[in-house]
Amino acid sequence: MVLHSKLLTIAVIILIIICASLFSFLETATVAISEHKLKLLQNKFKWARYAYKLKQQLNSVLIFSLFGNSLFNAVFTTLTTMLITLLLHNLSAQLVLPVATLFVAFIIIIFSEALPKIIASKSPLQTLRIVIYPAYYLF
């Protein structure tokens, strides 16, 4: 049962970091794409209509992205620290907390911040096609 709960916790942690990264994707892709291009594409594609509506409210979208990313990163931090503490329960707290902090910081910087922003800035159209529907309805 303990193994099952640890595996479930790991699955939830992975899902949470994916959710956090989606907010970074949205933020960067919305800023990177031109409003004019979205205006032209909105007649052809439904996703472009939603993206155009969000682009027109850019300040609100940026606040929404920051809030969502921060919320999921905080939950990720809590769950990951708890899991690392459980996995390394034989080691002293003086070692577990710094290891957990460094691990969590590394994962958040890479998978929730840097990688999504690099991908979204290089291909904002493809990124918006993927993230616009859930983002629009959450927004």
Image (cartoon, grey):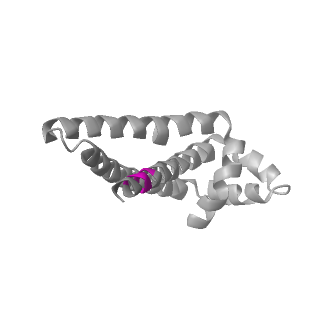
Query: Looking at the figure, which quarter contains the N terminus?
Result: bottom left
When the figure is inspected, residue 45 is found, relative to residue 31, above or below; the finding is below
- Determine which quarter of the picture holds residue 126: top right
x, y percent for residue 7: 42, 52
Q: Residue at x 67, y 49 (%)?
A: 128
Is 74 placed left or right of 93 in the picture?
Answer: right
**Left or right placement of residue 98 versus residue 38 in this view:** left
Tell me residue 98's x, y (percent).
22, 36
Q: Can residue 66 be found in the magenta stretch?
A: no
Q: Residue at x 48, y 50 (%)?
A: 20
Residue 139 visible in rendering: no
Q: What is the magenta segment's predominant secondary structure?
A: helix
The C terminus: image quadrant? bottom right
* Residue at the farthest bottom position: 137
Q: Nearer the viewer, residue 136 or 101?
A: 101
Residue at position x 41%, y 38% in the image? 107
The outermost residue toward the front is 1
Q: x%, y% of residue 45? A: 81, 56
The answer to whether residue 27 is visible is: yes
Q: Is residue 121 left or right of residue 89?
A: right
Query: In terms of image quadrants, where is residue 34?
Result: top right
| Number of marks | 0
Query: Quick check: is 9 in the magenta stretch?
Result: yes
Residue that extends furthest to the right in the rendered view of this protein = 44
| Residue 110 picture location, percent across and down | 46, 34
Residue range highlighted in magenta:
6-10
Within the image, what quadrant is residue 104 found in? top left
